[in-house]
Amino acid sequence: MFFGLTIEKLLLIGLIAAMLIGPERLPRYAENLARLAVRARDMAQGARSRMREEMGPEFDEVDWRKLDPRQYDPRRIIREALLEDAPVATVRTAAVAGVAASAAAPPPSPPAFRAGEAPPFDSEAT
């Protein structure tokens, strides 16, 4: 299921929670849980309608199944990446050349200030 919890474990947790809460407080907590579920559903529907408003007609054109993270298999992704020799090799060659060029260049020297002179203030630094 999720987080390694099975139906049996969830039922056991629910039974223990019902016994701890007690029969006099159980209806109130059940109402609170129902309100929480309704709010969560309303928030999800609100987010969906807001996305539809902001994206316009493009919202219906998006293939949401393609963006589902459950479809990604790490083994398949690695296998496909290893089988793509030509494009990856050119990127790696360019990256290695860039690293070699930056390693050969001397590091920039910091600006020198005289004793008692303050560096310029940068309002966007923090």
Image (spheres, rainbow, N blue to C red):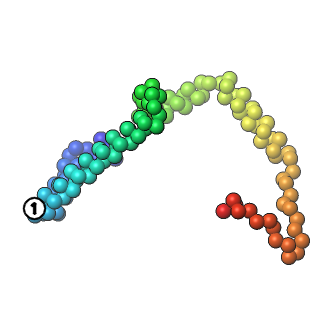
Name the residue: 86% across, 62% down: 111
Name the residue: 81% across, 41% down: 100
Amino acid under label 1?
Answer: Pro
Residue at the far left in the pictured view: 23
Residue placed under numbered mark 1 in the picture: 23
The image shows residue 126, relative to residue 87, as above or below, that is below
- Left or right of 58? Residue 42 is left
Q: Give the image location of residue 104, x and y in percent.
A: 85, 45
Depth order, front residue of 107/40: 40
- Image quadrant holding the N terminus, namely top left
Residue 92 found in image quarter: top right
Q: Give the image location of residue 30, x and y in percent.
A: 17, 55
Q: Give the image location of residue 11, x and y in percent.
A: 19, 49
Name the residue: 66% across, 28% down: 88
- Image quadrant holding the C terminus, namely bottom right
Name the residue: 85% across, 54% down: 108
Badge 1 density bin: few <14, some 14–19, many ≥20, Cα 10 Å: few
- On the question of residue 66 being in view, the answer is no
